[in-house]
Image: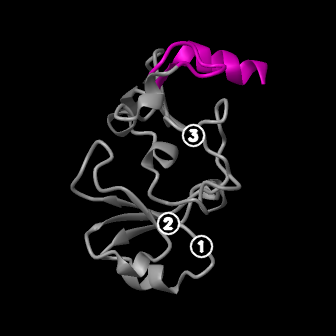
């Protein structure tokens, strides 16, 4: 419904293959294999019809929210202790994972979809890029992870 309008188009292969092939208004897709972890097998493609393995295909968000110029995602840890009434506890120390290479919306998709260090936030992928170990403007420390308190402060001050 309307409350989920913020989620990108998503298809599960092989179940949704026919529906995926009829969607023509999306330029780039991200594919995540169903039986993998740590960023293995994730790829960006302009031709989802060529994907043969089971997995999830989503519309790639070409103009994402950036943190000091880097793509990021949030790892929030929760415990649900009850559904009626709903009771959820959020662990205070979430993790913000960063790409190793800055994302520039104007060129990120035209210069190559294979640059995993620019497109994927998986720490197990980005730790192999030397840039991940360098200091970055606006980010304390080095590495592919950003501390929650620093992120919260950034959002509050923006």
Q: Are marks 1 and 2 in contact (CB under 8 Å)?
A: yes
Q: Is residue 91 left or right of residue 40?
A: right
Instruction: Tell which of 29 and 86 is nearer to you.
Output: 29
Along the line of sight, which residue is nearer the eye, 2 or 143? 143
Looking at the figure, which quarter contains the N terminus? bottom right
Give the numbered dot on residue 71.
3
On the image, the x and y values in percent for residue 95 come to 46, 24
Give the percent coordinates (x, y) of residue 71.
57, 40
Q: Which residue shows up at 59% across the image and 22% down it?
A: 136
* Residue 62 seen by the camera: yes
Is residue 137 on the magenta stretch? yes
User: In whole angstroms, how far apart are the C-alphas of marks 1 and 2?
Assistant: 7 Å
Q: Camera-side residue: 134 or 16?
A: 134
| Residue corresponding to mark 1 | 26
- Could you classify mark 1 by the number of other residues whose Cα lies within 10 Å: few (under 14), some (14-19), or many (20 or more)? few
Residue found 35% across the figure and 40% down from its top: 125
Residue highlighted by disc 2: 29
Q: Quadrant of residue 15?
A: bottom left
The image quadrant that residue 17 belongs to is bottom left
User: How far is disc 3 from disc 2 in space, using C-alphas?
Assistant: 16 Å
Residue in the image at 41% along x and 27% along y: 78
What is the quadrant of the C terminus in the image?
top right
153 left or right, relative to 135: right
- What residue is at 51 percent from the left and 13 percent from the top? 141
For label 3, count other residues whose C-alpha is less than 10 Å away and answer few (under 14), some (14-19) or many (20+): many
Residue 86 visible in image: no
Task: Give me the C-alpha separation between circle 1 and circle 3.
Answer: 20 Å
Q: Reply yes or no: does residue 123 show up in magenta.
A: no
């Amino acid at each position: 419904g309307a409350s989920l309008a913020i989620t990108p188009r998503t298809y599960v292969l092989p179940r949704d293959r026919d529906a995926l092939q009829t969607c023509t208004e999306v330029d780039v897709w991200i594919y995540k294999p169903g039986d993998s972890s740590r960023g293995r097998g994730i790829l960006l493609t302009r031709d989802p019809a060529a994907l043969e393995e089971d997995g999830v295909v989503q519309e790639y968000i070409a103009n994402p929210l950036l943190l000091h110029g880097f793509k990021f995602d949030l790892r929030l840890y929760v415990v649900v202790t009850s559904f009626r009434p709903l009771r959820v506890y959020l662990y205070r120390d979430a993790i913000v994972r960063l790409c190793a290479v800055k994302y520039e919306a104007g060129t990120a998709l035209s210069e190559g979809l294979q640059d995993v260090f620019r497109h994927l936030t998986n720490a197990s992928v980005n730790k192999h890029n030397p840039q991940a170990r360098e200091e970055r403007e606006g980010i304390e420390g080095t590495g592919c992870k950003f501390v929650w308190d620093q992120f919260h402060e950034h959002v509050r001050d923006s």
